[in-house]
Amino acid sequence: WGKRPLLDILLGRATSADALPLHPLVIHLTNTLFGDSLAAFRIASALPSAIGLWFVYQIGRRFSSRVGLLALWLCALSPGLILYDRMSRYHGLTALLCTLSVWAALKLLDSGKPRDAILYALATWLMLMSYFLSIFVVVAQVGCLLLLWNREPVRRTRWFFLGALCVAGLAFAPYLLAGLSKASSSGMTEIHVEDAGMSLGVNGFIRRLSLPVYVFCVGETLYPWTWFAAIPGVFAALGAYLLGLRAIWRERRPEIIIPIACAAVLILSALATSGKLGGGQTVGSMAKRVSFAIPLFSVTLSVGVFSLVGSASVWTRRVGVALASVLLLVSAYSVANYWTGRQFLNPNYTAPWYETIAVMERTQPLRADTALFSRGELALDYYLKDLQLDSKGAYINNESSGEQDVVRGLATRSVRYVWIVGRDRGDQISLSGFLQMSDYLKHRYRQVGHYGVMPRTATEAKYLEKFLKRPPAPHYIWMELYDTTQKPTAPTAPEVAP
């Protein structure tokens, strides 16, 4: 997206129907400054997320410096943020702008100064320009404003707030209308999962809400059946959140925006995407799409912890210390799983591409007599480039959509060996694209190898079968190798990566 002309980016023509121009503009900038590399793409998400920690501390410091410090550490160790914000996507940027918008809103409600109104309007507009679902943060802000309409300091500054919000909303309105029009006419109403019953309606809403809540609590690198960490982590996080909500609500403080905005993002996003317009959003992607609210969740947890730690009762203070310890230890364990490659509840975004490439290099290297096809695995291009394998003469197409791209590629280039690579992501389009390529090749050429990387455990396969309502692939990534000089035989059983 960031490589498109600036005019296309500004007019929204460089993104998919559910995206907006701000992140492609940032990608365009980092790509210009640092070149065409994975690091240049990822810094556009990782750097804003790191900067956002300062605003997390500033929001928490409104309660006390200790609340601010714990909120900062909970956010910095959040497995969800660490997992998502290293992607070359908008998640880290939206997280920063969401946190900035809430901080600016509270600052404006305190002061009522024109300069704070300008800051809030700008921050909110930029947040909205980064991702559509951030509009629910604004919904929560308006709801809290109405809730505290006649209380100080809201009563004194409410019109400044509404005026700044109207300015931000009017500036965003053309992009919102264009996005809704594009979404309704360009595939966002298509079902991208195999069973509509798991993604739409009441069942879809439950799944789309429960997965992000779980990830907010313990991350995506901790299986639910790892009970010694998952159960304490979920209960500790939800308990701290409710304690934080209660502590803020008791004083009717404007900071009620923090927990309400977090809840609004989770609930309204699940509701919005479980209908016809949200059919294009896979259930497995819901956690990353709402991860921009994790900083607000972290602040609420910290407030909840210190509502106990600040008690006059020794036992209540000890419970607060224990609660903070559980939150930090579970987060650290989940992050350790991420860095060591264990327990990926939903490993869509951390594919072991180096291991995948190593399997291909040991079996049939990517040379001039070889072709490689995958469905939308653009990161593979950069991993191959990093290993200096992109210049060995192989025909590589990691944007294949199915059979027609394989036919076109083999007509363009005569090769002996053909690799196809696929991932089971719970995405009907990605899965069907791989199956089309596989079906085309196996009826014309001999399959000489079938390999798998990151095998599913029996428990994981059982969980995924219930969630996807179909048997999952035995490996997270699988590769098939064909020899175009030989006629087809019966397909071989998959092998584990050597």
Image (cartoon, rainbow, N blue to C red):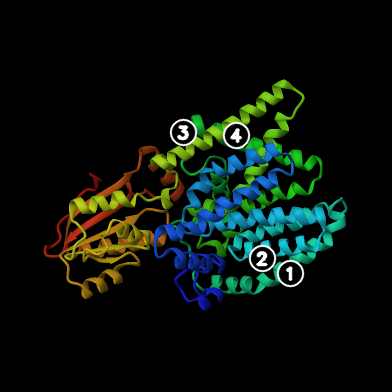
Q: Amino acid at mark 2?
A: Trp
Q: Is residue 46 left or right of residue 344?
A: right
Q: Is residue 50 above or below residue 70?
A: below
* Mark carried by residue 235: 4
Q: Earlier in the sequence, mark 4 or mark 3?
A: 3
Q: Amino acid at mark 1?
A: Val
Q: Comparing marks 4 and 2, which lies closer to the viewer? A: 2
* Mark carried by residue 294: none
Q: Report x, y in % for residue 388.
A: 27, 59
Q: Earlier in the sequence, mark 2 or mark 1?
A: 2
Residues at marks 2 and 1 touching, judged by CB atoms closer than 8 Å: yes
Q: Earlier in the sequence, mark 2 or mark 3?
A: 2
> Which residue does the image show at 87% across and 55% down from the upper left?
155
- Measured in 3D between alpha carbons, the distance from the residue under mark 4 to the one under mark 2, in whole angstroms, is 35 Å
Q: Is residue 314 above or below residue 384?
A: above
Q: Amino acid at mark 4?
A: Phe
Q: Report x, y in % for residue 323.
A: 62, 30
The residue lying toward the viewer, choosing from 389 and 457, is 389
- Measured in 3D between alpha carbons, the distance from the residue under mark 1 to the one under mark 4, in whole angstroms, is 41 Å
Residues at marks 4 and 3 touching, judged by CB atoms closer than 8 Å: no
- Measured in 3D between alpha carbons, the distance from the residue under mark 4 to the one under mark 3, in whole angstroms, is 14 Å
* Mark carried by residue 125: 2
Read off the residue under disc 3.
226
Q: Comparing marks 3 and 1, which lies closer to the viewer? A: 1
Q: Report x, y in % for residue 401.
A: 35, 67
- Measured in 3D between alpha carbons, the distance from the residue under mark 2 to the one under mark 3, in whole angstroms, is 41 Å
